[in-house]
Every structure is written in structure tokens, then in C-alpha cells.
Image (spheres, rainbow, N blue to C red):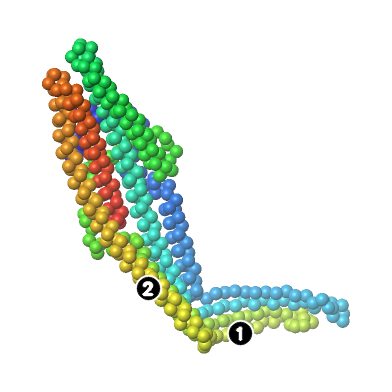
Amino acid sequence: MNNLSNTPILRLAVFVTALCLAIPTYSQITLAEYRQSVYAASPELANAAAIKEQSYSTMRQERTSFLPSLSASGSLKSALRRSAEGDKFWGFAMQPSISQTIYGGGAIRAAFNQAMTGYESSQYNEQAVMLYMRYAADYAYWNLSAQQLYKAATDEYVSIIKSLYRVVQERFAEGYVAKGDMLQVEARLSDAEYSQLTLQNNYDVALHSFNNLRSSAQSGDVILLESIIDSIPMPRRVTVEELALRRPDIQMAELAIRSAQWGTKIARSAYNPTISANVSGSWHTFTPNLSNKTYVDGAAVISLSVPIFHWGERRYAVARARADERIAENNLENALDDMLQEEADGWSALNNSYSQMQSSLKNLQIAGENLSISTYSYQEGQATVLDVLQAQISWIQIYTNAITARFNYAVAVSAYMRLTAED
């Protein structure tokens, strides 16, 4: 792709280059560097990382249910009454215990698998947030680039009209042009200077958004080492199969179905038989404690619990869990439909912006040649000032359209990369 380049814009390119060289090097930044600064400052990404850490801890916590547990209890007592000799009765007991669930009706494994599914989903959620923040960073970067070009173009436009105004003033003083021609140029200059102030404000707003996204207190201008007028390659269209595997929201929707299925097993397992084993010991004094002697005792117990009748509670619990499965399946269908539409819309916007960009470059070349010819013809007395003004207006409008087309294309590329989860 060709850059925005033609003869009338040569001074604009020199102006932009001089502006870049005048800014301190510490404010220079590439798109990749800006993305990293946005990632580092993003509270959304920090929350996504915290959610992932939380899900990982939940998964590890559920895993401990497979392992035996050790607990202990103890007591120390002293009776209020006294013995015949006047001594108080006292005693203590210490009871360690080891418990192991042999079969929990499938609830333990189902809960662990559900927690593991939640951890996988949190990883995809972090990826989705990362894609969103990358697009936000790209938009802010390209928007600032566009506003810099708008501002530079308007500054150049004002400079061109001032040059014409000086020529008209000289010719008016020599009596070659009417005062109406001079007033028309003066009005055009005033309008251009007004637009210059508006675009300066737009640039300031874009710069504030640029710095705010990376949580920077820096207020000065920055040098963007990449620009919307650079060659940005056209992405390859992603197939439906690739898209479904890449999109984190689709993966999360599929995991939601799996989590709901594990939830159904958890609901059902609550009404299955359970088997557990317990080994406990005790070290305590005799009761009543007449000799201050102690002894050690122990027991091994295997427990079986069988739910028999709960008035249909299991049926309702399982039906509710299966309803969650159906909801998750419907959500996946909606996500797939949205995915297909978003990809189709994104690809159409990408191709449309590319075509507009190519068309604007051709129009810009024609407008530049027309402006050069009109300006030269006026200086030679072969054209009126109205011809020059019209050529100037046409040039600035078409140049602005070219910048807009470049910006739209750059944003469309970033949007398509987000929609297709492109690295």
C-alpha cells in the first residue's frame, strides 16, 4: 500500500518530520510497547488474573477431598465437688482421628472436575479481557495518530491560505484584484483558523485518552513510531472451524455446558450411598479420676449411609440441574450465531475500509495536482481567486477523507484481530 504522498503534501511531510524530531526521545513509543503499558496498567486484566488465581485455589481445595483428613480434640475438666480427703476431681482427654471417604456417591470427583472446569474457563476469560484491552490500546494509538495528521493537515492548510492571502494583498495594493476577492480569502482564512482550534482540542482529548489508558501522568506530546499511513497488512480471513477454536467466549460457553453436566452429577450424588472409614484414638484419665492414672484407647469404624426416602427431593434437584445444562447449551448456540455474524460484519467492514482507503489515495492525488495547477494559474493571472479557494477546499476535504479512511482501515484490522482472537 502506498503512503499518503503527492506534491502539495511534501511540506506537510516535512512539517510532521520536524515535529517528531522536536519532541524528546523519551516520549517515543511503538504500538507493541503501548499495548504492554496498557496491559500493565489495566485493572480489568488484574481482576481477570485474580479470578484465575481464585479458581485455581478452588480447584486445589476440592482436590483435598480425595485425601484423608487428620483432626484432634481435647478437653480438661475439674469437678466442683471434692473428695473425702478434700481433693478436687479432675481429668483430661485427647482424641486424634483420621477420616477417609471411600465412596461419596460421586460427589467428590464431580465437584473436583467442576472446579477444574471453572479454572479452565477463568483462563479463557483472561484471554478475552486481553483481546479487549489490545483492541482498546490499538484504537487509542491509531486515534492519536489520526488526530496528529488532522492537526498537521489543518496547520498546512492555514499556511497555504496565508500564502495566498499575501499574494492577494499585494495584487490588491497594485490594483489587480477587487476588494471582494481579498475579503473572500480573508473569510476562508478565518474559517480555517477556527477549524485549527477545534482540531487542536480533538488532539488534546485523544492524547488524554491515550495517556489515561496506560495510567500515565505524562501530559506532553508523544511520538508514535507507527502511523496509520504506514503499510498495515490485510489479515487472512479465518474459517469457521478456526474461529470456533480460537474464540475464548466459545470455549467458555462449551466449558459452561461441561460444568453444568458436573453439577447434575453433584445433585444426583447427594442421594447416593456413601462409605467412609474412621480411625480414632484417645488418651485420657479414668472416670472418676481417683488415682491420676491414664490409659490409651482406640477404634476403627466403617460407616455406610444410604438415603431411602426424601419425598422426591432427588428428582427435583436433578431436574433443576438439567435445566442449567439446557440453558448452557442455548447460550452456546447464541454465542455461535453471534460469532458468525460478528466475523462476517468485521470482514465486510475490513474490505469496505480497504476499498475506501484505495479510492481516497487516488482522489488525493488528483486534488493535489488540481491545487498546484490552480495556484500556478492564479499567479500567472489565468485563474480567479475563487478557483484557488475551491481547489484548496477540495484538497483539504479529500486529504481529511484519506486520513479518515486510513484510520478506519487500521481500526478495522484491529477489530478483526479481536473478533478472530488473532495473536
Residue linked to disc 2: 326
The x, y position of residue 323, in whole percent, is 41, 74
Residue placed furthest toward the bottom = 308
Q: Residue at x 85, y 80 (%)?
A: 83
Question: Of residues 273 and 185, which is closer to you in this image?
Answer: 185
- In the rendered image, the quadrant that contains the N terminus is top left
Q: Residue at x 13, y 19 (%)?
A: 380
Q: Secondary structure at mark 1?
A: strand
Whether residues under marks 1 and 2 lie with C-beta atoms below 8 angstroms apart, the answer is no
Residue 273: tell me if it is visible: yes
| Amino acid type indicated by mark 1 | Ala
The x, y position of residue 282, in whole percent, is 65, 80
| Amino acid type indicated by mark 2 | Arg
Question: Of residues 159 and 64, which is closer to you in this image?
Answer: 159
Q: Residue at x 45, y 55 (%)?
A: 47
Tell me where residue 341 sits by quadrant: bottom left
